Image (tube, rainbow, N blue to C red):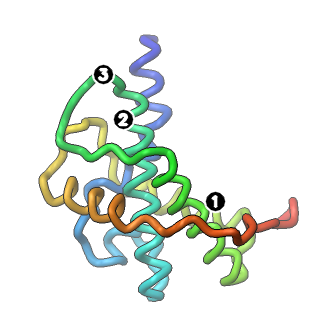
Amino acid sequence: MNFRVGLVAALAGGALFLSACGSEPEAAGGGAATGDGEFDTVLRCWALTSGAYFLHMALAGESGNLPKPDEATYTGWDKKLAILSFKKGMGFKAFNEMKNKAKGDVRVLSLNVDPAHAAAVQTCIDGVPPPTDEPDPSWPSDS
């Protein structure tokens, strides 16, 4: 198997949300929306930026209209999502299941996306949460 094809397939899960750009939170979350506007926005932006981040990594050297978030953007949304999830009382297993469910709706394997998708990713890049000194959640290993 071509390494690049295998890498794209392996990282595709991180890009599954791209078709939900600009959608209402429940569509963006692929049924993972909670009805909590802030949480749903963070979940959506985590999915959009992580998908774009890993897709750009997998397709290095290729070009397209999909904005390229940097690691600080991806990790900023990831940390915010983890903190909010932990504060909601979500266990680590449920947290990962929610993220997997959210990623499972749409597969995008190209850096060329609908302009609305590109705009939504850019909005999330521009709106990344500021760095926080709040510690990462410390889930029990069996949660």
Q: Residue at x 37, y 68 (%)?
A: 127
Q: Where does label 2 land, which residue?
A: 56
Q: Secondary structure at mark 1?
A: helix
Residue lying furthest left in this view?
115
Residue positioned most to the top: 2
Of callouts 1 and 2, which one flags the residue occurring earlier in the amino acid sequence?
2
Where is residue 75 shown, x and y percent of the image? 55, 54
The first of marks 1 and 3 along the sequence is 3
Write the residue at 57% across / 68% down: 81
Q: Amino acid at mark 1?
A: Asn
The residue type indicated by label 3 comes to Gly
Categorize mark 3 by other alpha carbons within 10 Å: few (<14), some (14-19), many (20+): few
Determine which of the numbered discs, if any, sits on residue 61 in the image.
3
Nearer mark to the viewer, of 1 and 3: 3
Q: Secondary structure at mark 2?
A: helix
Tell me the CA gap for discs 1 and 2: 23 Å
Q: Position of residue 34 (x, y in %)?
A: 49, 83
Residue identifier under label 1? 96
Q: Is residue 31 above or below residue 9?
A: below
The residue drawn where x is 39% and y is 21% is 5
Q: Which circle's residue, 2 or 3, is located before the other in the chain?
A: 2
Location of residue 13 with respect to 118 vertically, above or below:
above
Tell which of 18 and 123 is nearer to you: 123
Where residue 3 sits in the image (x, y, percent)? 46, 14
The part of the image, by quadrant, that contains residue 68 is top left
At a point 17% along the width and 42% down the height, the residue shown is 65
